[in-house]
């Protein structure tokens, strides 16, 4: 029997999650802008170094090698700058202009003012909303939360309660009714806000942005309806209890066992992934051992 529904998502939480979504979008352009500035400075420095190395008529072999190296560095930096500028054009839709917010996205004005009052947004000289230092720190915290979500909750997305098995998206065909999503139950047991866990899951999968009208839905207060429904429909700890040989096994006992197994398997999968990455990196690099060998002629 399904447990009683959880309380609805509060207006304060909706406001916080909405602000994080807007911040995520704005940072997609902001991070590229910072990268562009850094690359522009790098290109300028390399151009000066190359010009300096070109001076004079006669160069030693060492000077020619250094010049060739600096030219390669300059070429790569210019290519990287061109790529970043291209990505900035592709992500220009992530920006919010003050005038645009007053027209097409006028429904976002209360949320944008809320972010300004919290000190996470400001208006740039060209009248675009721009994250402040506090906003960038908040975004970094969001990134850390997303990384923690993947590490600690991803393993519980597909659980076969009958077999006591955890599905692996890389190897298993995750279809059928045998799989249960226990992320909400795990969050409940750990005392973590279930809505925040589902929010991070949807943000990680970019589900909020699949609808091109997501900003309109956000302004109308309907963007998080799906998230609320997911939380309400997921299994809770109490739902996991069962009777065996006329003895009652509580949901708390079940979820504790699931978490223990999940954490162990998650560590093992991360270890295997790390070993695979290290092996691939070692195979891609030159065999330095050969260089270190001493040969006597």
Image (cartoon, helix red, strand yellow):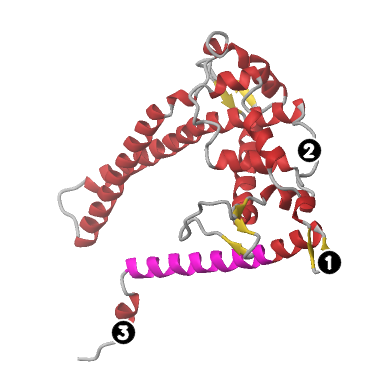
Residue indicated by mark 2: 6
Q: Is residue 124 left or right of residue 240?
A: left
Locate residue 140, reporting x and y percent.
Answer: 61, 42
Mark 3 or mark 1, which is nearer the start of the sequence?
1
Q: Residues within 10 Å of mark 2 (few under 14, many from 20)?
A: few
Q: Residue at point 57% right, 51% down?
A: 177
Mark 2 or mark 3, which is nearer the start of the sequence?
2
Do the residues bearing badges 1 and 3 touch, measured as CB atoms within 8 Å? Answer: no
Magenta residues, dominant SS class: helix
Q: Is residue 239 left or right of residue 104?
A: right
Q: Residue at point 18% right, 55% down?
A: 59
> Is residue 154 something that shows in the picture?
no
- The single residue placed furthest to the front in the displayed view is 246
Verify whether residue 280 appears in magenta.
yes
Residue indicated by mark 1: 246
Q: Is residue 65 left or right of residue 37?
A: left
Residue indicated by mark 3: 293
Q: Secondary structure at mark 3?
A: loop
Image position of 129 with respect to 132: above or below: above
Q: Residues within 10 Å of mark 3 (few under 14, many from 20)?
A: few
Residue in the foreground of this view, choosing between 263 and 280 = 263
């Amino acid at each position: 029997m399904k447990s009683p529904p959880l309380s609805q998502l509060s207006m304060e939480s909706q406001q916080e999650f909405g602000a994080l979504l807007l911040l995520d979008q704005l940072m997609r352009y902001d991070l590229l802008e910072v990268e562009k500035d850094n690359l522009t400075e790098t290109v300028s420095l390399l151009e000066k170094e190359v010009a300096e190395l070109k001076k004079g008529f006669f160069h030693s072999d060492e000077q020619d090698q250094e010049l060739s190296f600096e030219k390669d560095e300059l070429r790569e930096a210019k290519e990287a700058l061109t790529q970043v500028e291209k990505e900035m054009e592709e992500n220009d839709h992530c920006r919010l202009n003050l005038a645009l917010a007053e027209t097409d996205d006028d429904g976002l004005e209360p949320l944008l003012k809320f972010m300004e009052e919290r000190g996470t947004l400001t208006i740039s000289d060209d009248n675009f909303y721009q994250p402040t230092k506090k906003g960038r720190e908040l975004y970094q915290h969001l990134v850390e939360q997303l990384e923690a979500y993947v590490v600690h909750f991803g393993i519980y997305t597909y659980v076969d309660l009958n077999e006591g098995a955890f599905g692996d998206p890389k190897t298993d065909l995750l279809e059928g009714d045998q799989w249960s999503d226990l992320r909400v139950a795990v969050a409940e047991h750990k005392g973590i806000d279930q809505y925040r866990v589902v929010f991070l899951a949807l943000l990680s999968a970019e589900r909020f942005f699949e609808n091109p009208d997501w900003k309109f839905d956000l302004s109308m207060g309907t963007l998080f309806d799906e998230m609320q429904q997911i939380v309400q429909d997921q299994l809770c700890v109490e739902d996991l209890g069962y009777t065996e040989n006329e003895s009652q096994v509580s949901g708390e006992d079940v979820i504790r066992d699931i978490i223990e197994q999940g954490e162990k398997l998650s560590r093992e999968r991360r270890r295997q992934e790390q070993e695979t990455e290290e092996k691939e990196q070692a195979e891609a690099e030159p065999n330095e051992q050969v260089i270190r060998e001493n040969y006597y002629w």
